[in-house]
Amino acid sequence: MDAREGTYFYRSTAILAGLIAMTAVLSYFLNAPRGLPVISAVALLLAGAVWLCGWAGRHMIAGR
């Protein structure tokens, strides 16, 4: 049962991290025509941190 809950937690954090990363990429493409093609490193680092917390949480919940 705990392994399944860990998988759900990981999947939800992975989806959240994907949405954050997708927002950063979308912002890049929306600002490129204005001459401001800067990808947000902070948003990508936040997405990575969310994913990493989900990965670690999955293992902690499952007891591995």
Image: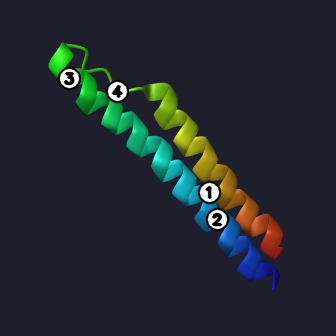
Q: What's the residue at 56%, 52% (across, down)?
A: 16
| Residue type of the residue flagged with mark 1 | Thr
| Mark 1, residue position | 13
Callouts 2 and 1 close, C-beta under 8 Å = yes
Q: Between marks 4 and 2, how big is the CA–CA gap?
A: 26 Å
Mark closer to the observer (3, 4): 3
Instruction: Give the mark nearer the N terminus: 3 vs 2.
Output: 2
Place residue 25 in its image quadrant: top left
Q: Where is residue 48 in the image (x, y as percent from the top left)?
A: 54, 44
Q: How crowded is mark 1: few (under 14 residues within 10 Å), some or many (20 or more)?
A: many
Q: What label does residue 39 carry, if any?
A: 4
| Mark 3, residue position | 32
Place residue 12 in its image quadrant: bottom right
| Mark 2, residue position | 10
Q: What's the residue at 25%, 15% (across, down)?
A: 36
Q: What label does residue 21 carry, if any?
A: none
Place residue 40 in its image quadrant: top left
Q: How crowded is mark 4: few (under 14 residues within 10 Å), some or many (20 or more)?
A: some
| Residue type of the residue flagged with mark 4 | Ile
Instruction: Give the mark nearer the N terminus: 4 vs 2.
Output: 2
| Residue type of the residue flagged with mark 2 | Tyr
